[in-house]
Image (tube, rainbow, N blue to C red):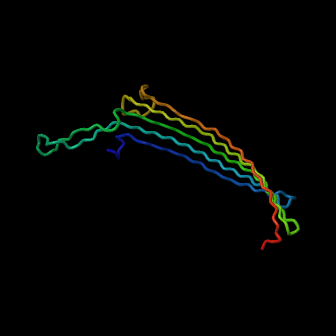
Amino acid sequence: MITTDQTGYSTDKRGYIQTTGTLEIKIPGVEGLKFTGTAAIDKYIQATKKWQIPWTLYERGNGFEADGVTPVLVPSKRGPAEPRLAESSAQQLNILLGRVVNYDKKINDIHTVNIVAGVNRETIEGNNFNTYRRFFLSNAIDQMFAGGDLQKDNGGGAINRTRLNYFGRVAEINNENRL
């Protein structure tokens, strides 16, 4: 019974899109100066559905039928008391953008000056929704509108967050003592 759809079913569909890219530009006319831009975009989508219906399991009882050969089978109701349906969906979009300027200049073959400055911006937006119904009139219609209005449950939420980071470094390296 459990390997058939006579007890209901459960689906979980997910989709992911993940991208990343980098662009590096050496600034003409200024030796050692370059700009690097990065981007990463991730999109996630999920939809779940769980349909549960009552089912009957027949167990061997005591004795035999009138023919004396066929065992008596006793029905036993299993699963939920009545059909029930739960559905949910979620989606989220993450965007990460980065920009870095790097200046690396050797002076008189003795000193190297390195300057790095950058900024990253991350945004996360998403939402989710879930719903639940019981008291369906029939096992034949597995759609939310066919469920009863008693003891129903709906929920959900959302996220919207942005983070901005600045960073930098200035370094002078003495090349005299390096091997």
Taking 97 as reference, is 78 left or right?
Answer: left
Residue 164 in percent (x, y) is at: 71, 44
| Quarter location, residue 147 | top left
Is 119 left, or right, of 76 in this rendering? Answer: right
Residue at 66% in and 50% down: 40
The picture quadrant where one finds residue 125 is top right
Name the spot of residue 149 as percent of width and height, x first.
43, 25
Residue depicted at x 59% and y 48%: 17
Residue lying furthest front in this view? Answer: 177
Q: Position of residue 170 (x, y in %)?
A: 80, 57
Query: Residue at point 36% right, 30% down?
Result: 138
Q: Quadrant of the C terminus?
A: bottom right
Taking depth in this image into account, of 114 and 141 the one nearest to the observer is 114
At 35% from the left edge and 32% from the top edge, which residue is drawn?
Answer: 82
95, above or below 175, in the image: above
Quarter occupied by the N terminus: top left
Q: Is residue 155 depicted above or below 171 in this figure?
A: above
Q: How many marks?
A: 0
**Where residue 162 sits: x, y (%)?**
68, 41
- Which residue is situated farthest in the top direction here? 149
- Is 64 left, or right, of 78 in this rendering? left
73 relative position to 136: left or right: left
